[in-house]
Image: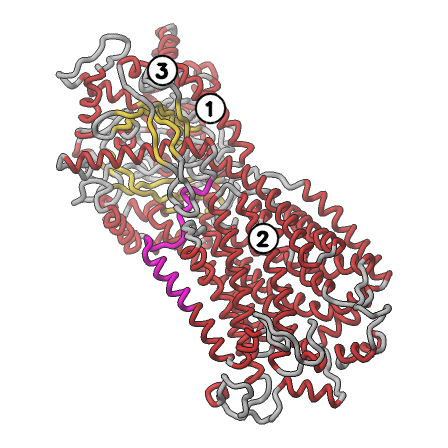
Amino acid sequence: IAMPSDGEGKATFFSDERNNLKIVNHVVRCPCCSCWAVIIICLIMCVGLGGILSGGDGIPITDDAHAYDVYDIRSKDYDSYFLAFDAMADARADSERREGEGGGRTQLQQEEASGIIYWIYEAETEGGMFTREAVADMHEAEGIMLRDKQWDEFCQLQYFNRTGARIPDDDVKCRKPMSAVTMFYPDSWDSAMAKSVIARLEDPATRKLFTDVCLCIDAFPPVEVSCNTFATYSPEDQSDMMELRNDIESITSKWSGEGELVQDPAEVALFAAYMKLVPTRAYLSDFYFDKEFSVENPVSMYSRTVLFFGGPHEGYKNVDDKEADQEKEVKDYVMDNLYDDIQKVSKRSHSKETNTFYFMTLLIFEVFLQIILMDTMAAIGSVILVFLYVWYMIGSLFLALVGMAEILLSIPCAWFLFRGIFQIEYFSGLNMLTIFIVCAIGADDIFVFMDAYNQSKHKGPEVNQDLQTRMTWVWRKSGKAMAITSATTCMAFLCTCFSPIAGTRSFGIFAALVILWDYVLVMSLFCTAVVIYHNHFEREPMCTIPILKCGCCTKDCGCMKEEVSPTGQIMQSFHDGDEIPMSPVTKFFYTKFADFILSVKGRVIVLVLFLAWIIPAIIWVTKLEPTKTAEQFLSEDHPLQYGWNIIEREFPSSTEDRGLPVFFSWGIAELDQSGVNQLIDANNVGKPRFKKFEMNPTCQEKIMKVCEDLEIPTPERLEILKRSGEGKVEVRCVMREFHKRAQQMPDVVTGTGDYPTVATADVTKVVKDLYDNPPERMDGVELVADMLVKFGFDGEEVKFVTVEVESNEMNQWSSLPEDDVRPIYGQFMDLATHLDGIVGDACGESGVLMTDEFQKFIFMNNQKIYRTSAVQGACIGVALAFAVLALATWSPILSVLSTLSILCTIMSVIGTVTMLGWSLGTVEAILISILAGFSVDYVVHLAHAYATSFGTTEERIREAFREMGTPVLSGMLTSVLASLPLFTCEIVFFAKFGTFLCFTILWSWIFANFGFMSLLATVGPAKLKEGQEGQRNEEQKGQEMGAVSAAPPESVQN
C-alpha cells in the first residue's frame, strides 16, 4: 500500500494527510463507541425485522404452493382452474351470507374419512407375510385400534354398501380396514369350497366366462358388451357361472377380520391370487399383496393396511365445522390411548417375523416438525464447530465471540434489507441454508482479516508507525481481497435470478445479501473488535476485567503493565533488529509448499495427478442423468421414508389406490397475469378469467357424451386411466346427478332425447337445489362436496363444468421423473383434444382446460427447469467470476487460469457425486446451479495476492502463499467443519447439501493451491516495481520478512 515517505501528503475525503483512512482513525480513537454503534445499528435492524415479520401471518417462510414457473402452460392451466375454483367458492359464500345461510351441508356423524393410519409390513422370513406368525403380527398391530373401547367414536362409519345403497341405521358400523387380516380371520372358512373355486378358475376359458358374468351383473352400470356376450352362453354355462359367483360371494362375505385365524393361510393366499384375475373381484386382494404376488407365486413379502378415522364428530355440523377442534380431539385420543402401543409394535425388535411401519396423517405434521427440529440441531452444531475452530486459530475468545456474532447477525440484517428495503416478500425455505454458507464464508473472511493483521507485523516501520497506520494497511489489504471474493460469490448467487422459479431467485438474492452484509460487518464490527483486542487482550492486562477498568475511547490506553502498545513493540523490534517470526503454518506455505510448487518435478507430479483425475471426472459428468425414481424427502433408512419406499416400489397400482385426479374443464379462460411479481407478492399468480359459457341442452348432451366416451375401455384409455373395482374407467361426471335431480323436480322441464336435458332457464335452479339439498352419495362418491364443485357455480350462474378422471400410473404421493411423466402428459393432452372435439362450441367458446390436482405436470416442467438452470447457472457463474477477476486483477492470464480452476472444481464435484450414485434430481440441480458461488473464494484469494505482489514469478508465488496460504487453509477447514453436522440430517436436501458443500470446498482448495498455483509458477508473469531490475532491494526485503533474511528461501528453512 503506497504511503507518503515523509509522512505528509494531501488529505482527501476518505484519507488524511498521512494517507490513513479517516474511518479507521475514528475506530482506533474510539473503538468501543464504534463497536457499540455497529451493534446498535444491527439490533435496530433486527427489531425492525421483528416488527415486519410480526405483521404477517405468523410463519415467515413462504409456502411453496407456487414454487414453479408461473408462465409455463402447465402452470397457467393449473392456476387458471384453481383460481376459478376459489373464486366460485368465495362467490357462493358471499351469496349464502346475503341469504342468511352458510356453514355448509350437514353431514352424517363420522361419514367422511378425516384421516388414516397406514400400516406397512415387511416379512423377515422366506415364508412371506402370510404365515400364521406374520398374520398374527398384523392382527396385533391393527387390533390396537379395532379393539379399543373408544374406536367406534372416532372411526369412519359406513352408511353405504359398495353399490351405493344406504345401510339401515341399526347395521351401521365402523368401516372395515383395508387389510388382508379380514380374509385370514374370517367368520368361517370353507376350505372345500375354496379349493373348488380355485380348481374351476384354473381353467382360462372358465375365467373368461366368469369375467363376462361379473362385468354384466356386478359392474355399475353394467358393461353392455359383456352382457351381450353373456347372453350367447348356453344355459348350462350361465348356470355354472352363477354358481361360481355365488360360491365366491359365500366365501368373501365371511371376511370380517373378527373370527379365528385360519389353519392354512397359504390356501387363503392362493384363493386371493385367483381373485386378482377377475376384474370385478380384484379389489378383494390386489391392494394387500406386493407386485410379485401371483397364482404362480402366492407369496407376498410385503403387505399393507389402511384404517380410517371419520368425521364430523358428535356435536359438529360437518368436517369443516371447527376443524381444528375436531383434529385435536382425534390427536388427543390417539396420544392418550393408542400411541404407546403403536410405537411398541413398530420397533424392529418387536417381532422376528415382520417389520412394521406406520404413517398417520393426523400426526404427520408433528413427525415432520420433530425431524426439522432435530435437523436444526445440525445448524447449531455447525455454529459451535466453527466457533471452536475460529477460537483455536486466532487464539482469542473475545475475537471468536465477536466473529461468530457478526456471522450470525449478518442473517437478520440481510433479511431486513431483503424484506424491509427491497420489499421482497417471498422467503423460500432454501434461504435457511445460508446459515451454513455464511458460517463457512464468514469464518474465511475473519481469517483473511486476522492474517492481514498478523502480516502487518512484518511490513516495516512505515506500516507500523502507529495503530492508525497499521490498521489502515490491514483494512485496505484485507478489504480488497474480501471485496473481490465477496463480489464474485454474490454475483454467482445472483445467477439464480435467471431462474423462472421464484423460490430459487429468492434464495440467490438473499444469499448474496447475507454475503454482502457479512463483508460489511467484518470490515466494521470485527475491525473494531481487533482494535479492542489490540488495546486490551493482545498483551497481559494489569486488571482482572480490563475492559471495565480501562477507557477505550482514548488515543493510548495506559492501564496495562507494559508502557508500549503491541504496535509500539513491533516498532521497537524493528529498531532493535529483533526478528519477528512467522507462524509455523505460514512458514510451511512460504518454504516447503512453495518449493514443491516451484520445482519442475513437483509441477509434473501435480499435472499427472490432475490429468489422471480430471479426465475420468469429466467422463463421469457426462454420465449424470435425470433421476428415474421418485425423489425422497427423508433419508433412506428413516422409518417413515423406508415404509413409504415399500409402498412406492413393492406394490402394484391397485383398484383401491387413489390415482392422480385429472380435470377436464370447459368455460375457464387463461388467467390474467398482469402485474404478477412473486418476489414482491408471493401468493399473486394472477386473476381468474372465464369464457362465455352457457349450459344449454346441447352443452349438457355433449358433456354427457364426454363422460360416456371416457368410460369406453379402449387399450389407450386403460393405459392412462384408472379402473374401478368393477373394471370400468373411473369417471366422476357431475352431469349425471344434475339430470337425476332435474327429473325429481316437477317444475323443471326436461328433454326427451338420449339424455334428459334441462332447459337453459332452469339450470341455475337445479344446481342451486343440489347445493342446498345435496344427496348423501353422488355418482358412487361419498364426498359429495368434491363432486358439486365440478359445477363452477357462483350462487347465481354456472360458469364452467368439470369432468374428473384418475391417472392409472400416477398418484398424489409420489413424483415420477420427467422422462416418465412427459409421455403421460402427452397422452392426456391428446385425450383433451379428443374430448374438446366432442364438445366443440356447444357450451359457448370452445377450448378445454386440462390439469391435475397435485401439480405433477408442473413438477415435470420444474425438473426440466432445474436441469437446464443447473447448466445455465454454472456457466453464468463462471463467466461472472471471470469478469470480476479481470476487473480486479487487470491480468488476462490470472483471469483465465482462475476460471480454469473454477471449471475444474465444478467438473470434479459433479463427477464425484455422480460416482456416488447421485442422479440429476431437484436437489442436485439446485446445488449445481449455485456451485460456482462456492468454488471461487480460494482461487480468487490467491490470484489477488499474486496480483498485488511484486517481484519475479517465484517471489510472487511465495508472497501469495505467505499472505493467503494460512487463511485459505483455515477457511477450508472451517467450511468442512460447517458441513459435517449436515451429514447426520434426516432431510435429504440438508444431507446432500452438506455432502455437496464438503466436496466443493475440498476440491476448490486442492485446485487453487496445487493446480492454479502450479500453472502460475509455469506461465505467471513477473511484476517489478519502478526502478527495480530483476530483484528487490535487500533492505526492503529484510523489513518485510522480519525473521526472514534477504537470503534465498533456504535460509528460512534453516
**Circles 1, 2 touching at the beta carbon (< 8 Å):** no
Helix, strand or loop at label 3? It is loop
Label ID, residue 491: 2
> Which corner quadrant of the image does residue 419 belong to?
bottom left
> Which corner quadrant of the image does residue 83 belong to?
top left
- 362 in the magenta segment: no
| Among the two numbered marks 1 and 2 on one chain, the one whose residue lies closer to the N terminus | 2
* Front of the two marks 1 and 2: 2
When the figure is inspected, residue 454 is found, relative to residue 829, above or below; the finding is below
In this view, the residue in front, 760 or 268, is 760
When the figure is inspected, residue 46 is found, relative to residue 155, above or below; the finding is below
In this view, the residue in front, 60 or 199, is 60
Helix, strand or loop at label 1? It is helix
- Residue 614: x and y in percent read 74, 49
- Residue 39: x and y in percent read 45, 72
Colour logic: secondary structure
For mark 1, does the 10 Å Cα neighbourhood hold few (<14), some (14 to 19), or many (20 or more) residues? some
In this view, the residue in front, 816 or 514, is 514
Q: Which residue is mark 3?
A: 841
- 58 in the magenta segment: yes
- Residue 570: x and y in percent read 68, 85
Three-letter amino acid code at the position of disc 2: Met
In this view, the residue in front, 526 or 639, is 526
**Circles 2, 3 touching at the beta carbon (< 8 Å):** no
Highlighted range, magenta: 43-68
